[in-house]
Amino acid sequence: MVILEFKNVCAGYGTYEILHNVDFCMNKGDFVGIIGPNGSGKSTLLKAAAKILKVVSGRILLKDIDINKISLQKFARTVAFLPSDIEITYPYTVKELLLVARYPFAPTFSNPSKKDFEIITSVAKQMDLIPFMERTIFQMSEGEKQRVMLAQCLVQEPEIIMLDEPTAHLDIGFQFSFLDLLKTYQKNSSLSILAVLHDLNLAAQYCNKLILLDKGCVSISGTPHEVLNYQILEKVYQTNVLVYPHPISGKPYVFGVPEEWKNLTEK
Ligand code: ADP
Ligand code: MG
C-alpha cells in the first residue's frame, strides 16, 4: 500500500527553485533513504514532505490525500518529523519533552491523560530513557539527546517518521543502535521511515529503497543495489569510488579513494 507519494513536486525558497519535478512513492513499512551531495535538496525534500515547506507545483499525497488539505494536528497524528537542526534552549526535563510531543492527541488546554503517561513510559522503557526522565536536556550527551528526540517522535505513535540526518552527531555504536531501534519499529509496528542519511553505507545497510538526489532532481531511485552503482555515484558526487559487497550482509558498500591511489583502482 502506497503511504506517501510525490507527484512532480517543485519546491524552493522564495523565487529560487530547489527541487525540480521530484517523483517517488513510498509503501507502508518501507525504510526509504534520501541520499545525495551537500546542497542537493535532501532537507528541502524532507521539509516539503513534513508540510513545513509549501510546494510550488506538483502534489504530495499522504494515503492518497493532498497534504495541503490535511490540518496540521491531523497530519501530526500520522507523521512525526525530526529536523537536523533542532535546538532546545530551555532546560525541559525528558518527561516534559515527551509529554509535549503528545499534543496532537490533546483537546485544547487539557492536562495529559492516563494514556499519555502510559505511552511515554512505554517508549521511554524501550529506549532506555527511564533513568533520565527527570533530567533536563542540558544534562545529557549528544547520543542521549538524540534518543530523546527520537522518543518524542515515537510517542506520537506515527505511521511515518521523517528524520533529517539523525545519526550525524553519533559515534558508530550509537549510529547502529539508533538505526536498529528504528528497524525494530519498522518490523514490529509497520512504521514507515523516510530518512536523510548522508552516510551511504548506513543507508545501504538499513534502507530497502534509496532516492539519490542530484541538484534537486531524482538522479535514480530503487534498491541499494540499483542506486549504489559506482558509475552513478562517481557522476553525482564527482569523485572516485569503489563499491564492494558488505562481507556479511552482501549489501553494497562504498569506499572513497584518496587522490594518491586513484591510478591504482581497477573497476
Ligand atoms: P541538503 O540537505 O541536501 O544539503 P538543502 O535542502 O538544505 O540541501 O539545500 C538545498 C539548497 O537550498 C542549497 O543550495 C541551500 O543553500 C538552499 N537553501 C536551503 N535552505 C534555504 C533557505 N531557508 N533559504 C534559501 N535557500 C535555502
Ligand atoms: Mg540537509
Image (spheres, rainbow, N blue to C red):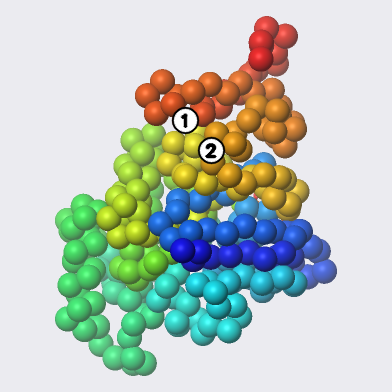
Q: Nearer the viewer, residue 77 or 248?
A: 248
Q: As shown in the figure, which amino acid type bears the numbered disc 2?
A: Pro
Horizontal side, residue 29 vs residue 33: left or right: left
Residue 224, disc: 2
Q: Are marks 1 and 2 in contact (CB under 8 Å)?
A: yes
Q: Report if residue 101 is visible in the image.
A: yes
Image quarter for ligand 1 equals: bottom right
Q: Nearer the viewer, residue 14 or 162?
A: 162
The quadrant in which residue 96 appears is bottom left
Q: Earlier in the sequence, mark 1 or mark 2?
A: 2
At which x and y percent is residue 213?
67, 47
Residue farthest toward the right in the current orientation of the protein:
15
At which x and y percent is residue 59?
66, 72
At which x and y percent is residue 220?
67, 44
Crowd rating for badge 2 (residues with CA inside 10 Å; few <14, some 14–19, many 20+): many
Please tell me which residue is depicted at 21% across the width and 84% down the height of the picture.
Answer: 113
Q: Report if residue 178 is visible in the image.
A: no
At which x and y percent is residue 37?
67, 42
Kind of element beneath mark 2: helix
Residue 172, disc: none
Q: Gap in Å between the C-alphas at discs 1 and 2?
A: 7 Å
Q: As shown in the figure, which amino acid type bears the numbered disc 1?
A: Lys
Instruction: Look at the picture and state if 25 lies above or below 215.
Output: below
Residue at mark 1:
251
Please tell me which residue is depicted at 53% across the width and 38% down the height of the picture.
Answer: 224
